Image (cartoon, rainbow, N blue to C red):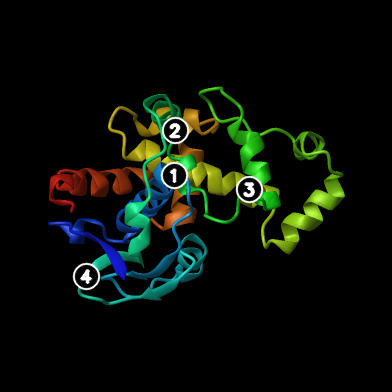
């Protein structure tokens, strides 16, 4: 039997680039897996929008079949996982939420990859402002030579600069959906010397400015009660 989680947004046109929709699916898949302490294998994901230019990233985030231009936005998986008990405590939930959104965007099955280990080293830093150590420091903490680590990351199709950008991107999405933070404050939290540098980086990642993304999210966030 197959179980499905369907998503409804009353104003999907507010999310022009579909980043909020995709981000929401990621969160619910990761959070559901975390609650039962089992990576839930998805059978397929259905999107209502056309196949985007960043479909390769979607393929990495959702390791299953992808369907675009479908009438319903949904995640599909084996119904047996509905019977798995929730094994997390309230204290674990509090700790988990303190580390979000980084923990919510961990790619299932990638925890033992070198890129995931590098991310874990950075995540262990408890400072509020993002701090990315020198590459040599990361390698030393992983008990591996810098050249070997660089080679392993290349095999995985990434690099330390790319990992840092991915972390900043993931955190930026979380901060932008939190109305307590201004663009200038988010820039500081992500380790940028000035808001202009953050804005330039975010435009490079998404094609739009962080302020426009935040406006789009704020319009859509009003409809969260419509989510099913």
Q: Is residue 193 left or right of residue 21?
A: right
Foreground disc of the pair 4, 2: 2
The numbered mark at residue 96 is 2
**Front residue of 99 and 95:** 95
Label 3 with label 4: CB-CB less than 8 Å: no
Please determine whether, in this image, residue 21 is positioned above or below residue 77: above
**Front residue of 125 and 14:** 125
Q: Is residue 173 left or right of residue 127?
A: left
The residue carrying mark 3 is: 116
Secondary structure under badge 4?
loop
Cα–Cα span, label 4 and label 2: 30 Å
Please determine whether, in this image, residue 45 is positioned above or below residue 167: below
The residue carrying mark 4 is: 72
Q: Residue at x 56, y 22 (%)?
A: 127
The residue carrying mark 1 is: 34
Label 1 with label 2: CB-CB less than 8 Å: yes
State the image coordinates of residue 137 (x, y, percent, origin top left). Answer: 78, 33
Cα–Cα span, label 1 and label 3: 16 Å
Label 4 with label 2: CB-CB less than 8 Å: no
Cα–Cα span, label 3 and label 2: 17 Å
State the image coordinates of residue 204 (x, y, percent, origin top left). Answer: 49, 55
Cα–Cα span, label 1 and label 4: 25 Å
Mark 4 or mark 3, which is nearer the start of the sequence? 4
Secondary structure under badge 1?
helix
Q: Residue at x 83, y 38 (%)?
A: 143
Mark 4 or mark 1, which is nearer the start of the sequence? 1
State the image coordinates of residue 52 (x, y, percent, origin top left). Answer: 39, 71
State the image coordinates of residue 146 (x, y, percent, origin top left). Answer: 84, 45
**Front residue of 6 and 146:** 6
Please determine whether, in this image, residue 186 is positioned above or below residue 162: above
Mark 2 or mark 4, which is nearer the start of the sequence? 4
């Amino acid at each position: 039997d197959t179980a499905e989680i369907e998503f409804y947004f009353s104003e999907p046109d507010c999310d022009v680039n579909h980043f909020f929709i995709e981000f929401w699916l990621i969160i619910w898949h990761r959070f559901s897996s975390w609650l039962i302490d089992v990576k839930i294998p998805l059978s397929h994901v259905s999107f209502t929008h056309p196949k985007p230019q960043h479909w390769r990233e979607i393929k990495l985030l959702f390791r299953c079949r992808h369907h675009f231009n479908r009438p319903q936005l949904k995640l599909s998986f084996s119904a047996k996982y509905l019977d798995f008990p929730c094994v997390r405590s309230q204290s674990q939930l509090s700790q988990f939420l303190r580390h979000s959104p980084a923990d919510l965007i961990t790619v299932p099955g990638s925890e033992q990859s070198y890129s995931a280990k590098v991310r874990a080293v950075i995540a262990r830093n408890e400072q509020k402002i993002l701090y990315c150590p020198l590459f040599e420091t990361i390698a030393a903490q992983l008990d591996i030579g810098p050249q070997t680590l660089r080679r392993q990351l290349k095999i995985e199709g990434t690099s330390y600069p790319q990992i840092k950008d991915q972390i900043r991107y993931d955190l930026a999405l979380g901060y932008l959906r939190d109305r307590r933070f201004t663009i200038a404050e988010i820039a500081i939290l992500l380790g940028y010397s000035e808001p202009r540098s953050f804005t330039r980086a975010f435009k490079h990642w998404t094609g739009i400015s962080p302020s426009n993304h935040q406006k789009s999210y704020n319009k859509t966030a009003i409809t969260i009660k419509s989510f099913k």
